[in-house]
Amino acid sequence: MTLPMPEHFSELPLSPVMQRALAKIGWTKPSPIQAGVIPHALEGYDILGQARTGTGKTASFAIPILEQLDPLRVNPLPQALVLIPTRELANQVHGEFVKLAEGCPTEVVEVAGGKHMQKQLKALAKGVQIVVGTPGRVIDHIQRGSLRLDGLWCVVLDEADRMLDIGFRPSIERILRRCPQNRQTMLLSATLDERIRDLANRYLYEPVVVDCSDKDVSVETIEQRFISVSPDRKQEVLLQLLEREQPPQAIIFCRTKIGTAKLHRQLERFYAGKTDRKVRVGTIHGDMSQPQRDEVFKALRENKIDILVATDVVGRGIDVSSISHIINYDLPDECDDYVHRVGRTGRMGRSGIAFSFVSKDQGYLLTDIEQRINRMLEKDPLSEVVGKRRVPTEASSKQDVRTRAAIAHEPSAHGDLSRGDLVQGDSRQVVIGSESPEVPEADLPFGTAPARRTAGRAKSRGSVRRR
Ligand code: AMP
């Protein structure tokens, strides 16, 4: 099925109130995922969409949901449920719904773990149309009886790959099994691997597949480089890099909470001693309370933080379009995490730059990343030269890139080993998987995909809402 790809929101069958809301926030052109999803979702089709954050994927499901909502007095039960992996994302998705609902009173509640239960209970009791929540907290509300699913006509699984990584599969399946069979289901994921396809086969009915995968969109506008450095010199090289780049706004990713807190302190000390310019450093990691994290996000959005030191736990939730630099101080073990981190910059087609620190035993990780994004990372001149601690000349670094490029294009069963050699020294390592174990649920019934719908919701209603 092919529908023409709309160039402007005005070409989509959206209500005047939605067109006005879009005009008010200054959006004119749908992003590729929006252009691909919205027309089909308005027709009531299930959607299997491949897109990462930063591509406008939230609005791709939020707009069709808002367009088809019944007023609260007509349907007092929740009508749409959006499942998302993290609190930060819940907050962001909630904010996006509120923004797009401008001009039409809409009740959206955020039910994420770590947030006030009482407030959520009160909001749910009052009556809501859209629930945005993390799977654990959603189940909690179902068990308490504070959240009913029988009025739902739409369920969204946002960042489904991340939810599976975290180990939410049993919870997701438990929730989906309780949702009405003839619902519309939209599944959005940065990757469509076997696990996602399996989930889609079970719970989606003949979905329209919209592919806005990373190979097309993620990294086009983001310059990506690596810096080879030994672990004991990372901090020193980081300071050199920050001094050279003077980033307007940067996120530095670390692997551990302790490492994050430590680097934050060191950077604070470094910038406290500088009199020529003021650089404000912030941090965010899993040990901080939700109000603390919210405060940091707010400060980042309001440009009151110039450099944020963060862990991956919170990395995905960050949606600040002004971020110019991403620095992977510690490389992630998973390529998808790399894509997500780097995607914090270059939002909605803006340009950005990402640097990754690579030690001599991490060549294989670099190769994996390059294969994942289908692109070679350029070697930054700050890189150490094998065996020596000095900054290479521009010519030597260019030579290095050429050699690496040539080798990467050679068909070789040992690509990552040779690649490790190229970064520095020997690297005969096995790739470490850090995926959370998924506990298969014993009572999982097969064939729980929703029954055939006679027509899409919008079709059966004859028109979209709010006209
Ligand atoms: P998302 O991928 O949903 O996290 O969106 C990334 C950012 O792009 C958010 O700040 C959105 O508000 C913004 N955005 C989404 N769609 C559009 C659009 N069509 N035009 C301009 N900005 C957009």
Image (cartoon, rainbow, N blue to C red):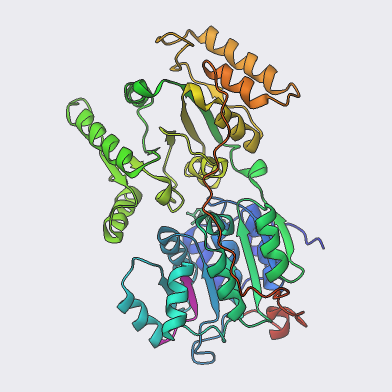
Q: Nearer the viewer, residue 373 or 68?
A: 373
Residue 146 is situated, as x and y percent measured from the top left of the image, at 42, 84
- Horizontal side, residue 398 vs residue 381: left or right: right
The magenta stretch spans which residues?
Answer: 126-133
Query: Is 121 above or below relative to 236?
Result: below
Task: Find out whether residue 132 is within the magenta segment.
Answer: yes
- Horizontal side, residue 252 vs residue 364: left or right: left
How many tags in the picture?
0
Q: Residue at x 37, y 32 (%)?
A: 247
Task: Find out whether residue 277 is within the magenta segment.
Answer: no
Q: Residue at x 61, y 60 (%)?
A: 188
Residue 194 is situated, as x and y percent measured from the top left of the image, at 69, 54
List the single residue furthest toward the bottom: 74
Q: Nearer the viewer, residue 446 or 79?
A: 446
> Which quadrant would the N terminus be assigned to in this image?
bottom right
Query: Is 123 above or below relative to 364?
Result: below
Q: Residue at x 56, y 86 (%)?
A: 151
Query: Is 109 above or below relative to 319?
Result: below
> Which quadrant would the C terminus be assigned to in this image?
bottom right
